[in-house]
Amino acid sequence: MHITFTKGSGKHDRMEIWRDGGVAESIECPKQGIIPHDMVHFAVETVLHKRGFIGRVLAGEAASFRMEAESESDGVERLVEVFQADGWSGWNSAPADMLDLYRVTCEARQCPALKVDASDIEAVRARILELTAQWQALAVGGTLGLEF
């Protein structure tokens, strides 16, 4: 599956998901001051080899803001939220603090936490920082293509 992110000029960027040579889904991504939310998903899911939003779309589900609850996918979503918070704080939170926040977030949302440790946090963050550098280098209208 090929994913293309396009940097928008207004309040949204865009993600297009390509399967078998055609666009399967196109999603507006609200700007959040860091890389798009679904690009964070890409980093988490590819580094940790976990099934989240993008993996579910690859498996044939429609890309929607309201997907049915699924244990692993819900755990991925909570971890994506933790990485977003890290990004809004400058990408320098201590991995132990991120793991604590992740556990609290999972408990509050009553979803099982994925088994992740500090080295997982550091590996995902490294990928996110690579994507951030590529994203920041794009002009409005520029695209970043990723293979999933």
Image (tube, rainbow, N blue to C red):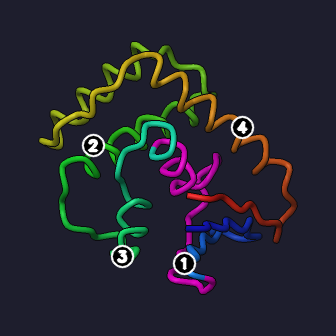
Residue identified by numbered label 3: 60
Write down the region rendered in magenta.
21-44
- Closest to the observer: 90 or 137? 137
Instruction: Place residue 75 in its image quadrant.
Output: top left
Q: Label 4: which residue?
A: 130
Choose between 126 and 87: the one closer to the eye.
Answer: 126
Question: In the figure, 104 relative to 10: above or below?
Answer: above
Pick whichever of labels 4 and 3 is earlier in the sequence: 3
Q: Secondary structure at mark 4?
A: helix
N-term mark: 1 or 2: 1
Circle 2 residues within 10 Å: few <14, some 14–19, many ≥20: many
Q: Quadrant of the N terminus?
A: bottom right
Q: Amino acid at mark 1?
A: Arg
Residue 10 on image: x %, y %: 71, 71
Q: Nearer the viewer, mark 2 or mark 3?
A: 3
What amino acid is at disc 3? Gly
Left or right: residue 95 compared with residue 144: left
Which comes sooner in the sequence, label 1 or label 4? Answer: 1
Q: Choose the circle earlier in sequence order: 2 or 4.
A: 2
Mark 4 neighbour density, 10 Å: few (under 14) some (14–19) many (20 or more): few
Q: Estimate the x, y position of residue 51 in percent, counting from the top left.
A: 35, 52
Which residue has dot 2 on it?
A: 75
The residue that appears at 43% across and 37% down in the rendered structure is 48
**Image-based side of 18 in relation to 100, left or right:** right
Disc 1 crowd rating (10 Å Cα; few below 14, some 14-19, many 20+) is some
Vertical order, 36 against 131 (above or below): below
Query: Pointers 1 and 4 in contact (CB under 8 A)?
Result: no
Q: Is residue 3 magenta?
A: no
Name the quadrant containing residue 3.
bottom right
Task: Verify CB contact (< 8 Å) between mark 1 and mark 3.
Answer: no
Q: Which mark is residue 19?
A: 1
Tell me whether circle 1 and circle 2 mark residues in contact (CB < 8 Å): no
